[in-house]
Amino acid sequence: MKNRIRELREQQGWTQEQLGKLVGVSRQAVNAVETEKYEPSIWLAYDIAQAFGCSIEEVFLFEESIKKSRAACSRRGA
């Protein structure tokens, strides 16, 4: 999942460590999310968005998944 964490963090003049302290995670966790090596829980995504004063959708860029949802697959079988 793509995100704008680095851009927003740099606009605020924050380090990864400072953002981590604001949202209750380590610098390494912030780095992993920022570099798209790890997808955050909805709660962490919310906390990060709140730290920036943004909505989750403004921080995390959701692209349509190639995978079909379970609901779509079950409708096909019906």
Image: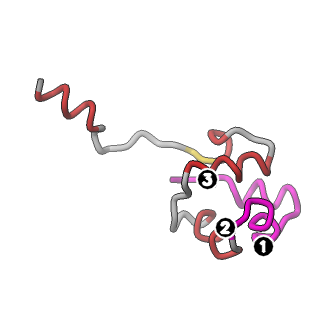
Relative placement, left or right, of 14 versus 35 is right
The dominant secondary structure in magenta is: helix
Q: Which residues are magenta?
A: 1-25
Crowdedness near tag 3: few (<14), some (14–19) or many (≥20) residues, C-alpha within 10 Å: some
Which residue position holds label 2?
30
Q: Residue at x 69, y 68 (%)?
A: 25
Residue 64 vs 2, above or below: the answer is: above
Which of the 4 image quadrants contains residue 56?
A: top right
Does the segment drawn in magenta span residue 71? no
Residue 21 x, y percent position in the rendering: 79, 67
Q: How is the image coloured?
A: secondary structure
Image point (80%, 61%), residue name: 22
Of badges 1 and 3, nearer the viewer stands 1
| SS assignment at label 3 | strand
Q: Which corner quadrant holds the C terminus?
A: top left
- For marks 2 and 3 on the same chain, the one whose residue lies earlier in the sequence: 3
Q: Which residue is mark 3?
A: 3
Along the line of sight, the residue nearer the viewer: 47 or 1 = 47
Q: Which residue is mark 1?
A: 17
Helix, strand or loop at mark 2:
helix
Are discs 1 and 2 less than 8 Å apart at CB?
yes
**Amino acid at circle 2:** Val
